[in-house]
Every structure is written in structure tokens, then in C-alpha cells.
Amino acid sequence: MIKVNGNDQTNDQSKDQTVNVPCFSWVLGSQSPRRKTLLKYLGVPFDSLPANIDESIKATEKPSVYALRMAEEKALKVAEKLAQQELKNSMAKPTLIIGGDTVVALGEKVLGKPLSESEALATLTELAGQEHQVWSAWAVVQFMHGQEPIILTSGVSKSTVNMRELTKDEIIEYIASGEPMDKAGSYGIQGQGGRFVSRVEGSFFSVIGLPMLDLYTALVEKGLIFDQTGFIKRGIELRERVAFAAWRSGRSVDAVNVLAVSKFHSLESIKQAYMCDFEHFGESYVQELLNKHDELKQYQQQLGPADRSNYEPVWHYIGGIQTNKAKRIGENSHWVHGLSRFSEAQKLAQGAQASGNSIQAFIQVNLAKEKSKSGLDEIELRSLLEACEKLNGLKVVGLMTFPPLDEPENNRKYFRVLRTLRDQLESEGYHLPHLSMGTSDDFEVAIEEGSTWVRLGRSLFGERPQA
């Protein structure tokens, strides 16, 4: 049972961990692409509807109060719009509306979205070299046709941001990109503006646009979602750490892909990951890959239109490759991490071509020269790269390494060497845009050193069951 305002509502699907909110419809009161992406991490299907309210700040209104008022008013405005719509079956159950607002403030002065390039120039000049605050607010409103909307919970999160000194030429070049023109404070930390920021204290997602952990905590405490395994929370935390590390490395927050290493984990766990917007799954055993590939596809087809994710699951093979099984891997995988022999590449390519597939492959480099692990040295690597260029159905897109199990900082040198090796190969004419490096224990260090794919299993799904 789930309680909503003291009323018990039957949860007919409570045993299915993939169904987080069986008795609500959800609406995001925003058309912001970033907020849409963040809200998907909760694993609830939702629609989006813009609020379009008067966003004028009141005299003497503090930035935190202003942000909270805006979030609540946006959610209430969406409720008003829903009340004007014709009653549909989907509206027969309560609708939860999420409103959000982000305010950039220098002390008590609110710095809104610039109305002109000259205003953006003035704002960024004022922020340069200064510490400022980002107030990110959220509100959850319950709407039901024929009833007054109710604010169930709301809150505001504060982050402190330091911007380095900027030259006028830097600011003008940034404004010319167009990015500042729809951003509070005239910059977006998630994009090119991230290079202007030297330090962030507090929630990184708050600065981007929605304090997901605070929102998640409030929803759980109110009984509006449930997270029996803790997967939703782990997913939010890991994605925030990945985005933060990408920013520290001087790249876009979207520069790093998360591979959910699902080997040995149940199909129910993979379903939940899929509903929480994880797209890429990694398996190490051929039969397990085949079984999960088919079962998840069946699950996707069974979902109703409102619940179906808008992407197909993407399967990665990350285990040792046996030549006699490589053809089947090629038929059923999109990516392969750990290629080390041309005979493997040939069979993978054959399988990919036979099924109309195309494999993107990482060559494994054994930098620590561990006898227990596969991988090539630099001379063998170049030979395999040249041989693979002649294959149809397989394309080498990067390098992969798996350093010794050690403290993260001790593995930094291996990640740095692999990045340097990749850069050298690119200077020789090879196109290798990706680096697959970093696992649950060291992914932040790997990202700081240039990783574009991190392989997360235990930190995401929990301890792995025994095979």
C-alpha cells in the first residue's frame, strides 16, 4: 500500500521492482532538456508541459525564497492547465507535477537569463573572479480532476560556485556560441561555460538544474516512490559523480558514457536499470548475453506506450573472447571491450555481417603486463589496428585497459599512459575517439584522465551474485 494524503491506495504491482509508482501519473512542469534527462533517473514515466508564468522577482525577495516560489508556482500553473484539459483515463488517477527553478545569485542579487548579448557580457564580467550561489528549487504538486491541487513537498538546495578571472575576449567568444542566452547567470556549467568555473561546493546536479538526491529523498519520505533495493539512489549518486568528474576533466558533463555491467545480475535488476534510463549493458558470458538480450526485448515490447523507453538497449560484450563463440557475440552485441587477436576480430565481423549488425570494438592493452589478463603491447597493438581496418562489420573505435586492483590514485598512471598512447596513435592517422577505462573502484580517476566509457557493476547493482 502507498499512502497519499492519508488515503491508502492499492499497489497491485508492488512485487515488481521495475514499477516504482503504480498509482500516479507524472508531469514535469518544464521543457528543459536537462531537467527531462535528470528526472528520467527516477525511473518513472512522465510527460512534460511548460508552465509559462510571470518570473518577475519581488522587491526585497531573497534568492532562495524566489527560487522556491518559482518552483511551486510553475507546478501549480501546470495543474491549472491540466484542469482545463478534457478528462482522460490517464487523468482518473492522481497526477504528480514536478516544478523546478534555478537561480544564480551574487550575494542577494539575482542574475537572471540575459535579454541581450550586452547584458550577458555585463553579467559574466560581474561574476568573473567571484564566488556566487546557485539556488535550485523543486516542488511536488498533487493534481486530481475536480479537486484543488496540493503542494505535497518542496525544497531548495544551495551550491556555491567559484568563477575564475575571465578576459573580455573569452567572454565575447563564449557569448558568440549562443550558450549563455537561455541560462540563468549567463553560463551553463554543463557545457562550454564549465571551463570558467574553478570550484563547486554542494550538489553538482543542482547547478545543472535539479537537485536530484534532495528530490529523491523527499519523494521516498512521502511514500511517493519506493526504492526497495536502493538502485535508484545509487544510480543518481553515480551519475552525479560521473558528471562532476567529467567537468573536472575540462569536458562536457555528457562526455562520459556509463556501461551498466549487468553480468550475473537478475533480469529484474536490468529492467529497473532500463527504466531508470540506463541504455548500455555489459555481459561477459555468451549464453547469459543471449538470454538477457531476448528477455529484455520481450519486456520492452510488453510495456505500455507511456512506460516504454524511447531507445533500444545496447549490448556490450566485456569478457574474454573465445574464437569459437566470437561469431555469436558479433551477431548479438553492438560493442566489444577487450579485443586482442585478429582471429577474434574476424569471427566478430562475420557474425555482425550475418545479422546486419556492426561492431564497435576496443582493443585491450595490458599496460601492467599481468599474465592473468588479456591484452597487447604497443607493437602488437599497431599490427592489430592495421589488420582490422580491412574488415567489414567491425570498427576499432578505441582502447581499453583493466589495471591491477589497487588504490584509485595508484591506477592513475595506467590511465594516463593509455590516453597518451591513444593520442599518439591518433596523430599517426588512426581514429580512436574512445577510451574504455575505469570501474566501480576507480572510475572518477579514469574520467579525470580522459575515459569516455566507465564500466560500473558493483557500485550500481550492488554486490554481484555468485555465478
Image (cartoon, grey):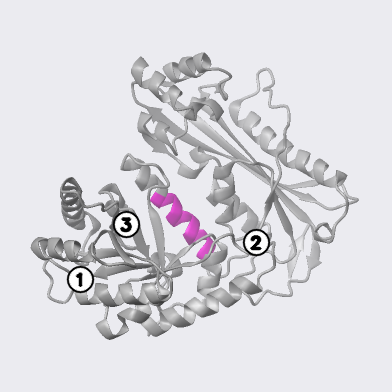
Mark 3, residue position: 443
Q: Is residue 358 magenta?
A: no
Q: Quadrant of the N terminus?
A: bottom right
Instruction: Give the mark, 1 or 2, whose residue is nearer the N terminus.
Output: 2
Asked if marks 1 and 2 touch (Cβ < 8 Å), the reply is no
| Tag 2: amino acid | Ile
Q: Please, what is the three-letter code of the amino acid marked with disc 1?
A: Ser
Secondary structure at numbered mark 2: loop
> Would you call the spot at circle 3 few (<14 residues within 10 Å), some (14-19), or many (20 or more)?
many
- On the image, the x and y values in percent for residue 201 come to 42, 38
Q: Which marked residue is nearer to the observer: mark 1 or mark 2?
A: 1
Q: Which residues are magenta?
A: 231-242
Question: Residue 402: x and y, percent?
Answer: 23, 65
At a point 30% along the width and 65% down the height, the residue shown is 361
Could you say which quadrant of the image residue 64 lies in? top right
Residue carrying label 2: 225
Relative to 196, residue 22 above or below: below
Which label is found at residue 340? Answer: 1
Mark 2 is surrounded, within 10 Å at the Cα level, by few (under 14), some (14 to 19) or many (20 or more) other residues, namely: many
Q: Nearer the viewer, residue 414 or 332?
A: 332
Q: What is the C-alpha distance between the residues marked 2 and 3?
A: 29 Å
Amino acid bearing label 3: Phe
